[in-house]
């Protein structure tokens, strides 16, 4: 492979904090981050290094040690980056809580990950988190303290007060007891076949090395990345934040996905790297603001998580940016295949590009042997960035890997003669709605918890905006009278928005396979055939 552009510029470090340390000493006055591209002076690398040192000292003064978990509920904003890098610096473990999670979903993550500290926004988008945090603290005996990252709420120490603890107990230099780079640095919750999200453990080194590998692919300077993806997932933590940090670039945060505001922010902040889930591009490019704004600062437009609709290729290319797709999964941490900027429209819309030649990728047929070119098989990957396993789930961890250490992606792919890979199906039941992984079993369990439901089956069906959405087929209990609307409301109370089924059909019975399992293919056909 030809040398990647940032090969000699992006440093090799053992944990993401090392990127900040590296660039703060070389380009201390370079901008690091800002919120909403308001034109106010961005925080520089030097300032951020000071903020992170202070936060790290405050964490240590509060008894947080290497290996301890800290659960943080935040939107993408500079305070998030401060806490994220401070945890990295002292070797503690980041657990991101999605502000859109329901109380039930938050409870699962917190009781499973057992953090010593909870950090949360006081409120966001009209939701106050005070009661959620009180409930989490009561449910998880591990939590010693709650910190209000913004604002204040009862039972929480305001962030400024928390940081002031650093003044009386500064961080020793270099910080001792920061653990090993091979210990977990992140726990990312990803939905599971069993219905409960599983925590994928990613080591400090896996994340840092993944950032280095990706940063060399999209290296350009000076860079400004737009970061508006949730910080509990790989894309929001790594692709749009830590990868730009690895290149010494700047990050422009936006707390929410706001399609009308994005073009203006790109213009004002002179964003050069715009990474989104394809559905998001669709929603932005359909806005009149996208046609009116000057998007010529864009150098790279990147997407992953789902295929890009073909009709988006031309308008995105018209901005003058290079288009690049990444393919990976939570458990792989790093992107393992890329569509290159010179790929044609057909290749961009139908393939995930070519495997990164620096990493191992194989396609394995049902017989366990490498699939012949052109024949479908499971994509399996091996590299130093893979997750170390699922928290507390040795069986699920063992199932995720082959004996020789390849991660089973569950994606079925075909290698085309030009070396690009086309995804043709999945071995796992997961589907992607608006770029988010959804497991039907989790929705079925939520539906089955309704007193009026006797049985429920959920399948993925195509959707013009979200690519795929859940369609639920529900058999009611006799005389219950629970209708589709009531069931959607019920799901909304229990599941984050992208998991709520968009279609609910009340049926008398579910079609079964000879094995007694629900015949989901028949349900999918029934959905397509219904008017
Ligand atoms: P997640 O763990 O939520 O990141 O989901 C990972 C899954 O998203 C993969 O196993 C693929 O099925 C899908 N995926 C990731 N990247 C792409 C891409 N560029 N194009 C199509 N599907 C993708």
Image: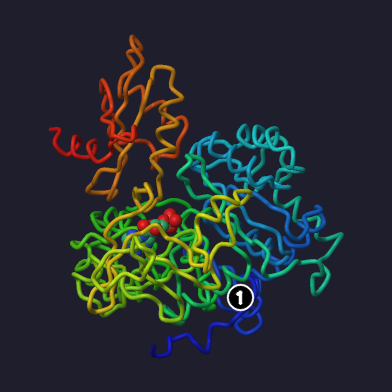
User: Which residue is disc 1 drawn over?
Assistant: 19
Judge whether 517 appears above or below 271 on screen. above
Q: Quadrant of the N terminus?
A: bottom left
Q: Quadrant of the C terminus?
A: top left
The residue lying at 34 percent from left, 48 percent from top is: 433
Image spot of residue 156 (x, y percent): 71, 41
The residue lying at 52 percent from left, 36 percent from top is: 127
Is residue 468 something that shows in the picture? yes
Image spot of residue 284 (x, y percent): 29, 56
Rendering quarter of residue 185: bottom right
The residue lying at 25 percent from left, 54 percent from top is: 287
Judge whether 95 appears above or below 145 on screen. below
Closer to the camera in the image, 56 or 201? 201
Is residue 262 something that shows in the picture? no
Number of marks in picture: 1
Rendering quarter of residue 336: bottom left
Q: Is 88 displayed left or right of 236 in the figure?
A: right
Closer to the camera in the image, 14 or 247? 14
Ligand 1 located in image quadrant:
bottom left
The residue lying at 35 percent from left, 50 percent from top is: 432
Q: Residue furthest top?
A: 479
């Amino acid at each position: 492979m030809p040398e990647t552009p940032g090969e000699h510029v992006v440093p090799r470090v053992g944990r993401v904090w090392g990127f900040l340390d590296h660039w703060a000493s070389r380009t201390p006055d370079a901008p690091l981050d800002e919120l909403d591209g308001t034109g106010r002076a961005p925080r520089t690398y030097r300032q951020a290094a000071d903020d992170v040192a202070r936060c790290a000292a405050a964490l240590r003064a509060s008894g947080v040690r290497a290996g301890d978990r800290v659960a943080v509920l935040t939107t993408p904003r500079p305070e998030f980056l401060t806490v994220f890098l401070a945890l990295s610096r002292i070797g503690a473990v980041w657990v991101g809580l999605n502000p859109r999670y329901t109380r039930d979903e938050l409870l699962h993550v917190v009781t499973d990950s057992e953090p010593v500290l909870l950090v949360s926004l006081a409120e966001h988008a009209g939701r106050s988190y005070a009661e959620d945090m009180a409930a989490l603290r009561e449910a998880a005996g591990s939590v010693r303290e709650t910190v209000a990252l913004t604002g204040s709420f009862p039972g929480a120490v305001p962030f400024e007060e928390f940081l002031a603890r650093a003044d009386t107990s500064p961080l020793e230099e270099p910080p001792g007891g920061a653990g090993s780079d091979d210990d977990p640095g992140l726990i990312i919750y990803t939905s599971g076949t069993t219905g409960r999200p599983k925590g994928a453990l990613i080591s400090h080194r896996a994340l840092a090395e993944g950032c280095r590998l990706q940063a060399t692919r999209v290296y350009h300077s000076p860079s400004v990345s737009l970061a508006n993806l949730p910080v509990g997932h790989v894309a929001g933590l790594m692709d749009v934040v830590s990868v730009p940090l690895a290149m010494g670039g700047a990050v422009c945060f936006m707390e929410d996905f706001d399609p009308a505001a994005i073009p203006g922010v790109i213009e004002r902040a002179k964003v050069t790297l715009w990474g989104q889930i394809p559905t998001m591009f669709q929603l932005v490019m359909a806005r009149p603001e996208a046609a009116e704004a000057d998007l010529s600062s864009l150098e790279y437009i990147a997407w992953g998580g789902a295929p890009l609709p073909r009709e988006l290729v031309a308008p995105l290319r018209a901005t003058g940016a290079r288009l690049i797709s990444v393919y990976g999964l939570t458990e792989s941490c790093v992107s393992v295949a890329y569509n290159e900027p010179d790929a044609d429209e057909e290749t961009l819309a139908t393939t995930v590009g070519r495997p990164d030649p620096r990493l191992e990728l194989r396609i394995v047929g049902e017989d366990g042997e490498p699939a012949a070119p052109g024949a479908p098989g499971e994509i399996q990957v091996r590299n130093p960035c893979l997750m170390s396993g699922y928290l507390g789930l040795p069986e699920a961890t063992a199932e995720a890997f082959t004996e020789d250490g390849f991660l089973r992606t569950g994606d079925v792919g075909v290698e085309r003669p030009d070396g690009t890979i086309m995804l043709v199906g999945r071995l796992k039941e997961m589907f992607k709605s608006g770029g988010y992984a959804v497991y039907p079993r989790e929705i079925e369990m939520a539906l089955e918890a309704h007193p009026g439901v006797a049985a429920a089956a959920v399948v993925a069906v195509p959707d013009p905006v979200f690519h795929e959405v859940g369609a639920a087929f529900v058999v009611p209990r006799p005389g219950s009278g629970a209708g589709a609307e009531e069931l959607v409301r019920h799901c909304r109370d229990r599941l984050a928005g992208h998991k709520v089924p968009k279609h609910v059909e009340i049926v008398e019975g579910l079609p079964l396979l000879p094995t007694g399992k629900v015949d989901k293919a028949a349900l999918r056909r029934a959905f397509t055939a219904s008017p």
